Image (cartoon, coloured by chain):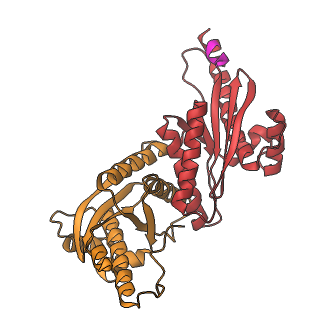
Chain colours: A orange, B red
Amino acid sequence: MAEQTEEAQPRVILGIDPGTVVTGWGVVQAIGSTLRHVGHGTVNASPAEPQAKRLSRIYQALSKVLLEFHPDSVSLERVFFARNVQSALKLGQARGVALLAAAEHGVDVHEYSAVEIKSAVVGFGHATKQQVQMMIGSLLRVADRVPVDAADALAAAICHLNRQAFESRVADALPKRATPLLPRGTSAR
Amino acid sequence: MAEQTEEAQPRVILGIDPGTVVTGWGVVQAIGSTLRHVGHGTVNASPAEPQAKRLSRIYQALSKVLLEFHPDSVSLERVFFARNVQSALKLGQARGVALLAAAEHGVDVHEYSAVEIKSAVVGFGHATKQQVQMMIGSLLRVADRVPVDAADALAAAICHLNRQAFESRVADALPKRATPLLPRGTSAR
């Protein structure tokens, strides 16, 4: 009984796709197995602005989103590759303020690989950004075209919800006192 | 006359050396050509803590320092190299929250290369961390040994003060209505 109540409780996940030029965000709510689009947006940084000012803009925007939607968790892509050290440093700076915004609002962070995130919405780990964008529109029944960076963020949110639902089904199928077979959604280290 | 008054006004610079494990900070005050050590410290992150929590610790500590010492500017090392993409990403995250802390407190950020920073205190761009540490102790008359990361931060602060003093001397030597010959301390882009 307890599991069913837990299952029915809506969960709200904020996906973030941090970037040096565009940072996308998207909020998805799951009620049982139904996904509902709550909101999405992008934060655009002008290359003319000093770096610190741009990071501040990302931080302020994400803090506003966290305050408005009160997500249960934040989900974002784990990065393994970058064009070079300079782009990794800049991407790291944007990720840093996104992680900080989550921490400052007491929301835990989960990270998934690009393949896991794409597979969650397209069923194919090497899908293009446009394929993800198209499927997000269809899955979440959003009439207007979602910007690619926001679509990536919504995909990260759906990926975390799928993982949670899968873990919950596995837990239900196991004898009540057994320890879980799967590691819980890897938290950001 | 106006220039002399400006010259005599104390300037307070916060140097920051962001790092994934240890972040150093140091505050230096310049009254005319006299440098005074105001404070320094380090923020240590435990590898056992989630990344977001560690970034939050750095941000909170630097925010406290910014509130306490009201620096006129923040100075930090511009990074060109990193061991690999993963370490560049992690270093970027720490830099991101340091830059953000400065922006959130309305303090402008200046960046200098490692060679410029080391040259400012050791007169030799390829000095070791220990040489920088020793010279910082001697230059700022600090009796106790300053941790290497805090010494690097103090060196960044001194580097910015030197640059400002040099630019001010160049400006004084020029005919009054001429445009400055040198670009002003490169601001973080």
Q: Quadrant of the N terminus of chain B?
A: top right
Q: Is residue B48 above or below residue A50?
A: below
Tell me if residue B119 can be seen: yes
Question: Which stretch is magenta?
Answer: B5-9
The image quarter containing residue A33 is: bottom left
Residue located at (63% from left, 57% from top): B45
Q: Residue at x 53, y 58 (%)?
A: B53
Q: Nearer the viewer, residue B46 or B74?
A: B46
Question: Is B127 drawn above or below residue A112 in the view shown?
Answer: above
Q: From what the image shows, is residue A119 above or below residue B185?
A: below
Q: Position of residue A106 (x, y in %)?
A: 44, 56
Point 45% across, 64% down: residue: A109
Left or right of B78, for residue A132: left
Q: How many marks?
A: 0
Residue B169, horizontal then vertical, whole percent:
68, 22
Question: Could you say which is closer to the camera, residue A145 or residue B38?
Answer: B38
Asked which quadrant contains residue A23, the reply is: bottom left
Front-most of residues B89 and B94: B94
Residue A127 visible in rendering: no
